[in-house]
Amino acid sequence: MSYRIAYLGPSGTFTEEALRKLCHHYLSFSKEQSIEMIPKVTIPDCLSSCQKDEVDFAMVPIENSIEGSVNMTLDWLIHQVDLPIRAELILPISQFAIIHPNHEHLELKEIETIFSHPHAIAQCHEFIRKHCPNSTIEYMKSTSDAVGWVAKHPEHKYLAIGTQLAAELNQCLIRAAEIEDYENNFTRFVLVGRKVMAEIKQEEAKHSGKTTILITLPEDYPGALHQVLSAFAWRKLNLSRIESRPTKKCLGSYFFFIDIEQIMDDVLLPGAISEIEALGCQVRYLGSYPCFLPKTMSKLPT
């Protein structure tokens, strides 16, 4: 049996790195099961292919600790597809300065052009200002595309900001590691799909759990959001996230995307949801799933 999993590509992205960690370190597959990882150009491509059963699962980013929510992912999960969340992995994000092997001894101040995705450039402004003050910036669709571009142009003094995986896949050199401005840079990735996820490896049995729901408040109930939050508060259910997203029906109309730090049980969560529905709210269940955070990340010397 083979699982086909779409992810936000191209090959060498942080999404692929997160997917590899999830499948190889946290999930347990039998010898008869294989995994085919399929890169897609956009988040809608990933989720649409899963909705159409072209793949079994899709792996997409949903939130970054510095840049906030990935609105494209939220809006597609809310409006376009009906795919439960099966797992979450939080990946520490490290950016790497990557060059062609021909320029192994090149000084950074000699770099002419830096290529990367706009988000990666934004996360590394201090490094660029300090070490590559004379370089120009060229934006690419992804960090992987940037590394691939550098790999194909050995005659130029180019540098890409991207992942360690992209450097390995393109046979490029890492000139400097962990060049991001902020240390606490994490991204949450979610695995979605209608199929049941593989078993969790025994050594990773100690993991946190989460349940995600979508709430629509009644229009004629003043203080409804306060009542919703109270339903969780008196049951001592911790909410790790609450975010509003427009319903796209009219101005001022919102869904509330809520993460609850507990796997669905038989008493507390069903009771809270029943109380919320009794207020006239609509509740949509988006998944109850394990959450993984890698304990250590490989570090490369600068």
Image (spheres, grey):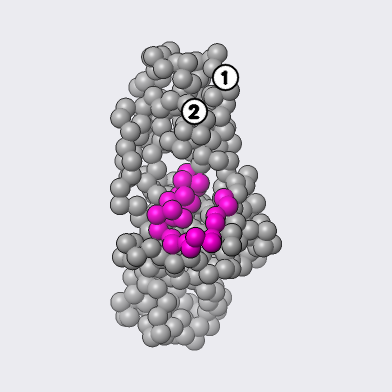
Above or below for 5 versus 83: above
Quadrant in the picture for the N terminus: bottom right
The answer to whether residue 108 of the structure is visible from this angle is yes
Residue to which mark 1 is pinned: 153
The answer to whether residue 135 of the structure is visible from this angle is no
Quadrant in the picture for the C terminus: top left
Mark 1 Cα-neighbour bin, 10 Å: few <14, some 14–19, many ≥20: few
Q: Tell me if 13 is positioned left or right of 260 in this view.
A: right
The reply to whether the magenta stretch includes residue 29 is: yes
The reply to whether the magenta stretch includes residue 170 is: no
Q: Amino acid at mark 2?
A: Gln
Relative to the observer, which residue lies in front, 221 or 119?
119
Residue to which mark 2 is pinned: 171
**What is the x, y in percent for residue 208?**
34, 65
**What is the x, y in percent for residue 128?**
40, 25
Looking at the rendered structure, the secondary structure element under dot 2 is loop
User: Which residue range is magenta in the image?
Assistant: 14-37
- Do the residues under discs 2 and 1 have CB atoms within 8 angstroms? no
Q: Amino acid at mark 1?
A: His
**What is the x, y in percent for residue 278?**
49, 86
Residue 297 circle label: none
Q: Residue at x 47, y 16 (%)?
A: 102
**Quadrant of the rendered structure where residue 275 is?**
bottom left
Q: Tell me if 214 is positioned left or right of 233 in this view.
A: right
Q: Residue at x 47, y 49 (%)?
A: 20
Q: Tell me if 98 is positioned left or right of 284 in this view.
A: left
**What is the x, y in percent for residue 163?**
45, 36
Q: Nearer the viewer, mark 2 or mark 1?
A: 2
